[in-house]
Amino acid sequence: MTKKLALVGSILAALVVSTGAVFSHGDVQPQEIKTDGLDKLGDEWKNENPYRGNETAIKIGASGYNQNCARCHGLEVISGGLAPDLRYLEKGKEGDEWFKERVTHGAIINGVTKMPVFAGVLSQEGLWAIRSFLESKHIDN
């Protein structure tokens, strides 16, 4: 009887811990990105990164990335496999197009949200600053 209770207790404990891990990812609130020092971009989304190479944007983007992206894409943009390794995202206009598409529309694969929509939640300035940071970490394929 004691062995059965111990087994049931162990199973319940494992279920509680694993359930917490599953739900904890979905409850994270995006953190505001302070963009002081960057030119305002207006409401219309730019097609190319207006802050490319801007050291202020890279610094702001590093903070914004760590607060909003690292939990899936990895610290220092080194993915652990949960989400794409953004160090390999193309530089320039082609990479900007992919980035803009993902942050403005998100990604749903097989009915599962793999990337949430960040446009309207985080500012265009903050998101392009993150893109600037990503380009500073770029690795050629």
Image (cartoon, grey):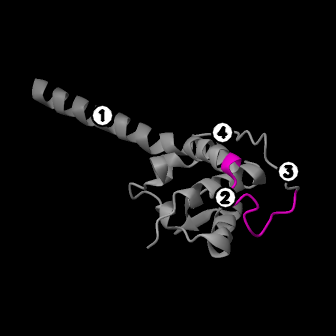
Looking at this view, name the residue that lies furthest to the top.
Answer: 2
Dot in front, 4 or 2: 2
Residue 109 painted magenta? no
Determine contact: label 4, label 2, CB under 8 Å. no
- Which one is in front, 116 or 66? 66
Q: In this view, does 10 lie to the left or right of 99?
A: left
Mark 2 secondary-structure assignment: loop
Report the Cα–Cα distance between label 1 and label 2: 52 Å
Kindly identify which residue carries mark 2.
53
Mark 4 closeness class: few <14, some 14–19, many ≥20 residues within 10 Å: few
Tag 1 or tag 3, which sits nearer the N-term? 1
Tag 2 or tag 3, which sits nearer the N-term? 3
Kindly identify which residue carries mark 1.
12
Report the Cα–Cα distance between label 3 and label 4: 19 Å
Q: In which quarter of the image is residue 101?
A: bottom right
Mark 3 secondary-structure assignment: loop
The residue positioned 64% from the left and 71% from the top of the image is 92
| Residue 43 point in image, percent of width and height | 87, 57
Kindly identify which residue carries mark 3.
40
Q: What residue type is labelled 2?
A: Gly
